[in-house]
Amino acid sequence: MGGRVLVMLLVFTAAGRAQELPEAPVSKAMVSKQTYTAFAVIGAEVVADGITTRVLYQRHYDETDPLARPFVHAGVPGQIGGSLLGLGATGGMWLALHRWHHDRAARWFLRSVAIGEGYNDARQFAILRTSRK
């Protein structure tokens, strides 16, 4: 009973806050070349992550991320869906930060996502290099 009340309180609070947000117009002028480059790098890293994850899974390594594990176990379509959800969440967070006029935070958010995904790819390539075929 207490959990239901807490969930309802969170939903109603979020719905109330969503109505108070100022509506900022989204124009093409706010997207810089640096942003396009960051999204291109993140997209390439997600593709590399998907390929190495699939190869490692076929070599009987399991996914360590509990959120991504069901997608990996669902096969290639599940992995593509999980990757698209992750990219959508990244783009949504970037857009939300821009609408709330936190441009520097949005820029650093994209940089940190690119760095984190790059670290994960490097780790997976190292595991792939030392694993048996």
Image: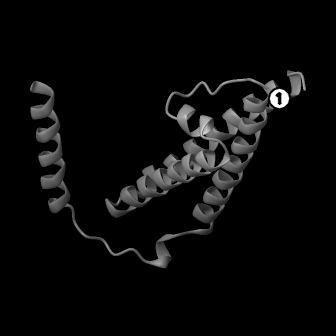
**Percent x, y for residue 27?**
43, 77
Residue at 56% in and 28% down? 65
Up/down of 1 relative to 90, above or below = above
Is 89 left, or right, of 20 in this rendering?
right
Q: Dot 1 corresponds to which residue?
A: 128
**Percent x, y for residue 38?**
62, 56
As helix, strand or loop, the secondary structure at mark 1 comes to helix
Query: Which scheme is used to colour this image of the protein?
Result: one colour
Residue at 51% in and 48% down? 108
The one nearer the camera, 119 or 75, is 75
Residue at 71% in and 50% down? 47
**Percent x, y for residue 21?**
21, 61
Up/down of 93 relative to 130, above or below = below
Placement of the N terminus among the 4 image quadrants: top left
Is 123 left, or right, of 88 in this rendering?
right
Q: Specify few, some or many for label 1: CA neighbours under 10 Å numbering under 14, 14-19, or 20 or more.
A: some
Give, as a three-letter code, the residue at label 1.
Leu
Placement of the C terminus among the 4 image quadrants: top right
**Percent x, y for residue 100?**
31, 59
Tell me which corner region of the image, top left, top right, bottom left or bottom right, holds residue 119. Answer: top right
Q: Residue furthest right?
A: 133
The one nearer the camera, 44 or 61, is 61
Residue at 13% in and 46% down? 13
Tell me which corner region of the image, top left, top right, bottom left or bottom right, holds residue 35. Answer: bottom right
The one nearer the camera, 128 or 99, is 128
Up/down of 76 relative to 29, above or below = above
